[in-house]
Image (cartoon, helix red, strand yellow):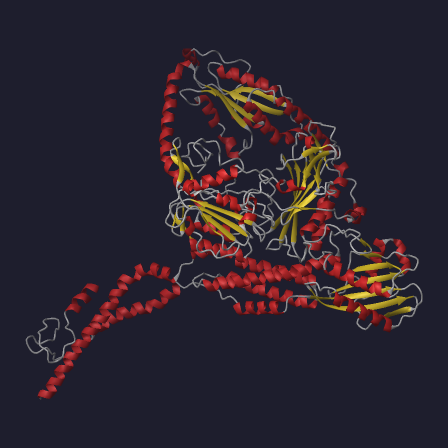
Amino acid sequence: MACNPRNSYPAQVFNNENHQLNLYGDNVEVDYRGYEVTVENFLRVLTGRHESAVPRSKRLLSDEGSHILLYMTGHGGDEFLKFQDSEELQSHDLADAVKQMKEKHRFKELLIMVDTCQAATLFSQLHSPGVLAIGSSMKGENSYSHHLDSDIGVSVVDRFTYYTLAFFEKLNMYSNASLNSLFNSYDRSMLMSTAYYRMDLYERSLNEVPVTNFFGSVMKTLHTDSAYTGFLAAHDDETPMSIRDNRHDHFMSKNEASARRSNREKEAQIIPHGWTEVLLEQLEGKNTDTVVLYGLGSMARRRYYSTYGHVATLAEEIQRGAASVTGVEATLWQVPETLSGEALAKMGAPPKRAGVPAIAPAELVEADGVLFGFPTRFGMLPAQLKAFLDGTSDLWCEQRLAGKPAGIFCSTGSPANAGAQGRAARAGRGERGERRDRASGDRRRAPGEERRRGREGGQGGKNRENRRRRS
Amino acid sequence: MAEIAAGEASAPPPPPAPSTFGGRPASNPTSTGSSPPSRTTKPGVKRLVLTASVLLSFLLGLPFLLKSTEIHRSPLPSDAITALAHRLHSNPPSFPCGLHAVFLRPGSGPSDASLASRLERAISAKLQLLPAPPTAGNVSVSATVESAGGCSSSSSVGSRWQCGVVTTADLVLGDEVFDELLHSALGSSGGDGSMVYTVVVVEIDDVEEMRVVIGKHRHAWLVGKVDEAKAVSSIGKVFVKYFMNGGIEEGETGIGKGEFMPIGSDGNVVLSFSLLNADPSGWMYDWDFEKIGERMLDPVIEALRPIAKINIESQVLYHTPKSSYSYADDKLGGNVLSMGDIPFFVNSNEWHLDTSISATGRSKVLQFVVYVPSAKECPLHLQLPDGGISKTNAFISPMWGGVLIWNPPDCSPGSRKTHGTRKKMSSQEHMETLEIFIGQLRQLFGLKPSYRSQDMDMSTKFVASEKGFTEWELDLLYRHHACSNLLSCLTTLESLSSLVRSLPRMIVMDEIGRQVELSLEAANLAQRNATLGISDSSAVSATRARALAEDAFFHPSIMSISYASVEHYFAIYMPFFAPVSLHVLLAAIKELKRYKAERAKYSAFLASRATSS
């Protein structure tokens, strides 16, 4: 959903029309998306029957001490949940999968939360011990959305999910709120349906179970009293003494590198352009090691095309800023002009800056990072730069520019074509508006199947949050 | 064809009594028009044969259809699984082992066999009183008394104790050397692989205090002036407490006490060592894990090979803040994390630890993390619940791994150097962290990180092994793993066989059948080895049996959702065949009826002719 092209807020999912809380935060891992979200894959994740090539991140690596949370929301009905509007997860499929998980000791405790219409029917077939289930509505009841987000045009959150989130927003890391307090926080008049929980399969009293057993990443830990003393002594006779000497020179250069790096980092903060900083960080993360070890200076290039000189001025400023950082050498280039001299004269263009050489595509390879600057012409990239970029196809074929940090800067709104650009911008907005309407169905209707899994929990249940979401 | 059959079918009359009237026109080519409703010629069988042959061809095709839509189910040896279950339940795997007590006496006292057998009986009686460990079977006890005058043994000596190789005088060489001497005297562990533990009592008159040293092989020795009764009781205690139970007391968690085994179900473990620089702007540490760590861990991996195939990986990560908060404590000199904060320490969002490529689907990854706090937060200490500071600064999370907070040597609360420097852990520091990791690994496997000296009522010393686990500890691990793996293999096979039974239309591939058979074979082998007391090969087979059983159970072709019921089968094939075959069947029936009716008419005609003539 977050990455759906019809989402007018790319990579964001909100729980509220105030757009305060982006549910699709920094640390959300999506392991299954789009066409991969099928009932079969879901059951494979639960039962652990994967092809051998399926990576670990896509598996539920739980063990007999794990506490697992299974959160499902979407469209449902009597004993089923819709997947992608095309398939259904039947309640007995779920019960079968849970039974096999239990037989293979894939969980210690499993909390199933279902937010669909008639949610309580989905777990009616379960009969494996250690399972606790809660659904947003009883049989014959509907589960309603919380409110309509008029900006996006859809209802972004269901009532049950909304109040669950609201409950957890109030907690902090150290809280020992019990599951009972969570379950009691659901108010029938707020939900407009009856939250039903089934606990006949669950042994512990809900008062004693902290919510952190299933939500959040809390590990059971044991202090290590002592090292295995004597282990070293048993090895003593073979302690290596020469390791450091071998690579002494190497370390020296690395130390120099880090000294330089730290200088640079400090100075980077003075640079006014935020994105320059980003670029420099990129350079640093990726290139400094190689750069220093091979004895080259770090080098960033700026390349621009400018007719009237605005972009050239910008480029010079950027060069000045970047060059003030130790270890960064910034070079200005311009792309070759394609217009004839006569045409330029008619446009009243000032002469090109002298002393800025024109660049050939092959020279891009020498740079550690690239910034492209260009004006807009009728709302677009000028043909000169386009021609230059097209000329890099040889490099692209060999992937020689892959991994180089790059950025752009541009100037726009030059008086000669301001009107045209304004129109273009309005047209663009109109189009977006239309898209949003089409997206409206998607937001609410696509059943966001969301799962957080506790994995490798130890008995205490270290629940790593892995949300899977339909996009 | 159906049309024709229907048309024809409407024509013939219901089976008429010969006397009834009612002209039936045209349907009968041989009817004689207005004459009585009887026929004068024998009805032809051509149409009957034709429809019957069409029906027959359909019927002949039926076996082909059934055959071609048959579900392939490789037969699972459910009888053998039940037999294995029966054997394991009636006779849980137990490893017989031996206890051999050797009394080294300084003087030339009497050394007759009667003394030896008396001691043997005393020790046996003592062992009866102590609680029996779960995985050990029969214990055969033997005793040897050796003195300058000679050497005599009780009847059944289990170990190959060579008299005269070790004397009381050798004690001065130090415990490690004495340990090796004893090992050579015992003739490096019996060739038959069964376990005989030896406790040597070295009697020295001039030492008042008795002390116990437990070696890194399968023996321990008691030194001091000991009377017989005390020696016998100490031997029993050492044997049961350490050699059988690994020093885990009742009520403690540990091996055999409900602890889970941190081993992947395919028998693989990846030890992933990570050096985390919380904030590299202060300093950045690097290590030489390939050179030091892997070399030092090689013997450990080798020692654990019977129970797990271990791979080692290492990585250095930067920008990995922890997720709990510390507070500055001037009294303790540094920043302090209380044990209550530790459950939140691991920051699974920022620590991208599980990047292993060698760990496949079901293998286990144990994380060992060296956390280097930022320069601002250094030194960072763990505070124990009693207010003291942890000696190791380390903790484990069962089934996950261990974390060690490592404060760099040049960190002091006063100096707040902020310029980042790239440093390397010295090999000494590195090895100290490894020592703690070995302790954590032992803890994860359910043993004690190390033994404290005052565990028993007399001073006890433990000789450490360069393998990280002493031989008697490894025996314990092997025994335990063999038993738990055998049981787990059995439950897996049982649930697989019940699953297959419950889904009659599930495809069972040949591969699954083969895996089950191999798993059973390995399980039987493990059980046989267990009864012989060969713990390591039993552990190997049990691990293999479990891995194969899991492979079979988790075979990707088993997916309950893709198996249709019988109703589903009919729903699929009915549309293909029902419309045609139904009509063919009806036509044949009707044709048969018609033929019967016609024949009845003809026979009535014959009868009437007979009566009239």
- Position of residue B391 relative to residue B14, above or below, is above
- The quadrant in which residue A376 appears is top left
Q: How many labels does the image show?
A: 0
Residue nearest the observer in this picture, B331 or A222: B331
- Quadrant of the image containing the N terminus of chain B: bottom left
- State whether residue B283 appears in this view: no
Residue B414 placement (x, y as % from top left) = 74, 28
- The residue sitting at the left extreme is B34
Q: Is the C terminus of chain B in the top left, top right, bottom left or bottom right quadrant?
A: bottom left
In the image, residue B367 lies at what x, y percent? Answer: 64, 45
Asked whether the viewer can see residue B86, the reply is: yes
- The residue lying toward the viewer, choosing from B548 and B350, is B350
Q: Quadrant of residue B273?
A: top right
Percent across and percent down for residue A73 are 44, 44
Which quarter of the figure has residue B121? bottom right
A162 to A310, vertically: above or below:
below
Along the line of sight, the residue nearer the viewer: B255 or B538 = B255
- Horizontal side of residue A135 vs A430, given as left or right: right
Residue B156 in the image: state x and y as whole percent: 79, 72
Position of A143 relative to B374 (above/below): below
